[in-house]
Image (tube, helix red, strand yellow):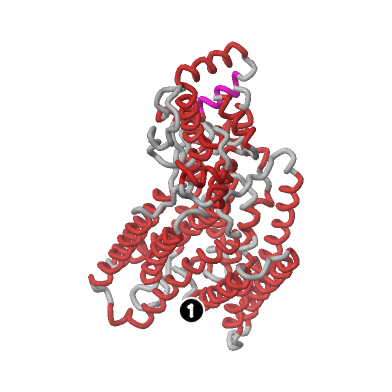
Amino acid sequence: MADAKSMASRLVHSGSWDEFWRTYGPRLSACFFGLVAVRVWTQCCIYDRYTATDSGTLTIASNLVRVALIVILVLLFSRVPFSQRMRKALEWLSVTAMTLCAACLLVAIEYPTLPLTAMAAVLGALGIVWGGGMWIEFFDRLDEGEALIYAFGCLGISALLGLFLGMMPPVAVFSVGLFMPTLSYVSLRQAADQLDERKSIIPEPTRDGAYDAEPKARFVLLLAGLALLEFALGVARGFPDGLSIALSFPFQATHQLLVLCLCVAVVFWVLVRGRRLSFGALWWLEVLLMVAGVVLIVASDFVQFGAMLITVSNTFMLGLLWYAVYDFSRHSSIPPYIALGVVWVVHLLPRELGRYLMFLWGPSVGNSVFLVAALVCLLSLSMAVVLRNCQPSRPFFAALGVSRAYEERLRAAVRDDGDDEAASRRGASRGARSDGPVGELGSIGSPDVRDDALPANGEGVVESSLKARCDALQARYGLTDRERDMAWYLAQGRSKSAIGQELHLSENTVKGYTRGMYSKLCIHSKQELLDMLDAE
């Protein structure tokens, strides 16, 4: 297999610890984990070390101001070009505001009569809007495997550090918070420089427009499902009277350790064991944690158990949403910071509204079964909206669903690449299988690879062989049916305008599908496509 090594370099999964370290170990860098500093600062200054479900009114006020600022930035930058100079200004503004927030909280310990807490809420919201958002552009330059490591790795490490924060006095906690914004900014600059330096060795993945052709209503429904879950989460966090539920240290520690274990499990399952992981599976986990937490908080003997599970759900949601935004941005023409802003508004606003409603209605609702029933209904509706007919043609986390059997065959091809006899046998085997079913190769994206989906302009051996080779590319690289059609038509020499007329699509839509297909195959021209098909 002539291009076995180049294809192996694009694999996400690996099959053992040894292979994992050989693949990702040389790329690891401490500064790539700089998002940890943002999470530690958040735990110090907004969520009070998770000694409770949150910091009560400080958290609500900070997040509502944060939502307003995110909306302003999204509206502004969707109309005005986001220049490098504006990015730099926002970065320094964020670092300054976050540092001053921690300073206000530190001084407030000594002078509690001053209105420093309210000032800290505003400064914290002003800083974190871009203090975390600036990292999404760094993630946008990583491939799927690295992004998974740093998204869930940063969340897991920050959870472990949060365990120690819970044992520290407030003075020490806010002192730590003072240094985190600067540490985050310095790490980001170093990380960007390292990505620039390694470009010639590890090319950055190109973005495609695979999601641009999707109906906008599909993504609106996904956001609606997220809003329903977040609203239920806010109500549960404010149960029963709107106040945050205090957690004793054993439950604080359990919360952080569970988050750490879940993050390690995600990375281990995908990158070490080489197993599939879908967005839907993680959403099921979120809903199950929420349902268990809701049921337990209404039982007077298990309130802390329930509050702890709800807090785990809320924290782990950060990793799920962050990686989902990364995945969407990699396959969309929408700038990553705008995508992140929209998702974070839907993440925060319904949750804080639910919490505020518990301030108003909580005392009258009490421990009624009605509240439990309402929350479970909301969670069920959220699950139905997100998991039922709302996934795009290219499902979220599609690169994490590649067939492990195919990857094992490809790794074997890399090991035997120097053996001409083995290469000849593999070529003969591929020729014998070329007209057989492609299901055995495994599917990355759509689970059903239909043999009749391609147009049939000819019935000869050449057309049949080309169809089988296009099907094989789809199975290997997770092409959608439309992207596979593009490969089939282009291999026949059709122009993009002719393809559009044949499929009743606009030429721009055809170009979008073609870009998506080229990106997944890591090629840039029709000739490279023909070379890949000839290699099958």
Res. 151 visible in picture: no
Q: Nearer the viewer, residue 436 or 193?
A: 436
Q: Quadrant of the C terminus?
A: top right
State the extent of the magenta-drawn residues as a range.
Answer: 408-416
Residue 337 occupies quadrant: bottom right
Could you classify mark 1 by the number of other residues whose Cα lies within 10 Å: few (under 14), some (14-19), or many (20 or more)?
Answer: some
Residue 43 locus on image (x, y percent): 55, 65
Q: Position of residue 178 (x, y in %)?
A: 67, 69
Query: Which residue lies at the image location 57% right of the left edge and 83% below the top edge?
Result: 118
Identify which amino acid the numbered label 1 is placed on.
Thr
Q: Residue at x 59, y 22 (%)?
A: 1
Label 1's element? helix
Q: Residue placed at 54% from the left, 43% from the top?
A: 498
Is 414 part of what is drawn in magenta? yes
- Looking at the picture, tell me which residue is in the foreground, 478 or 62: 478
* Residue marked by disc 1: 57
Asked whether residue 183 is in view, the answer is yes
Q: Is residue 139 located in the magenta-colored stretch of the structure? A: no
Q: Is residue 324 left or right of residue 293?
A: right
Q: Is residue 484 above or below residue 162?
A: above
Residue 492 falls in image quadrant = top right
**Image position of 145 (left or right of 217):** right
Looking at the image, residue 57 lies above or below residue 146: below
> Which residue lies at the image location 31% right of the left edge and 81% below the top edge?
363
Establish if 314 lies above or below 174: above
Residue placed furthest toward the top: 421
**Residue 112 x %, y %:** 58, 84
386 or 292, nearer to the observer: 386
